Amino acid sequence: MKNNILAGACIALGLTLAGLFIYCGLKHFADKDRAVTVKGLSTREVEADYAIWPLAYGWNGNDLPALYEQLERVTKRVKKHLISLGFEESDIRQGPISVSDNWSNYYGDHRPEYKYTLSTSLIVSTDKVQLVVASQGKESSLLKEGIIVKTESWNLNYQYNGLPELKPSMIEEATQNARAVAQKFADDARCGLGSIRRASQGQFSIEDDQYQPWIKHVRVVTTVDYILD
């Protein structure tokens, strides 16, 4: 009789424990679904800290040695112009010289007037970004001497290299903004906001200002899953 009672008690205890485990398991899965996914945004407006400014120019002629000498004189004059604007010699380097034989490349009955075209560029690479900005359109003194220099807008490159120092504060801000959104959701749902279950950082993007390309817009979005209590 005692053995039967003991066996019954063990069975009852086993069923109770099994029920408890099932309940805890169901609650775990239920709690697992009680979560909210939110996004946090952080933006900064920064100024470029480096500029690459190529100034291209060329000359036409039929005497190649004389044409080369002319190009050298023009190069010295353009460099003098840049130094007068405030740049250092160390900011300026010369690009490669390109030679085009116009008579060997033309098609049709009319041969070009000049056999050769020599072209090159002076490239300003500097952290004096505002000086580069202020120097745009100041080629009048060169034009008066018959020297035409070209700066293609897509070749004038303003760069921002401070992203590594900017990242920590932007990620922190984006995460704080995400938590604020999650807290509002939890308040509206009348529940508590728990810990982070999962988080992912989006890619940082740097875009030029449409009208002031030396101004950069930096942006990052974080995605965070919060548990709801």
Image (cartoon, grey):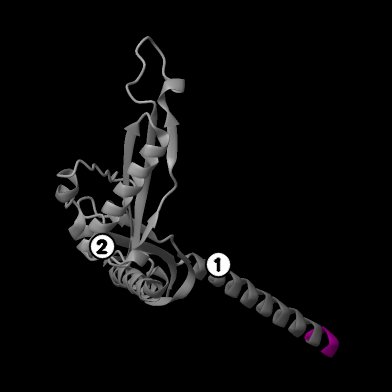
Question: Is tag 1's residue or tag 2's residue first in the polypeptide sequence?
Answer: 1
Q: Position of residue 153 (x, y in %)?
A: 28, 46
Residue stretch in magenta: 1-5
The Cα–Cα distance between marks 1 and 2, rounded to whole angstroms, is 71 Å
Q: Is residue 125 rendered to the left or right of residue 77?
A: right
Residue 3 counted in the magenta span? yes
Q: Position of 167 compared to 55: left or right?
A: right
225 or 144, nearer to the observer: 144
Q: Does residue 7 appear anywhere in the picture?
A: yes
In this image, 13 relative to 118: left or right?
right
164 vs 2, left or right, is: left
Residue located beneath label 1 in the image: 29
* Quarter residue 67 falls in: top left
Q: Position of residue 23 (x, y in %)?
A: 58, 73
Per the image, label 2 sits on a secondary structure element best described as: helix
Q: Nearer the viewer, mark 1 or mark 2?
A: 2
**In which quadrant of the rendered view does residue 65 lie?**
top left
Q: Does the image show residue 159?
A: no
Q: Main secondary structure of the magenta part?
A: helix
In the image, what residue occupies the spot 85% across and 87% down?
3
The quadrant of the image that shows the N terminus is: bottom right
Q: Which residue is mark 2?
A: 83
Callout 2 environment at 10 Å: few (<14), some (14 to 19), or many (20+)?
some
- The one nearer the camera, 52 or 5, is 52
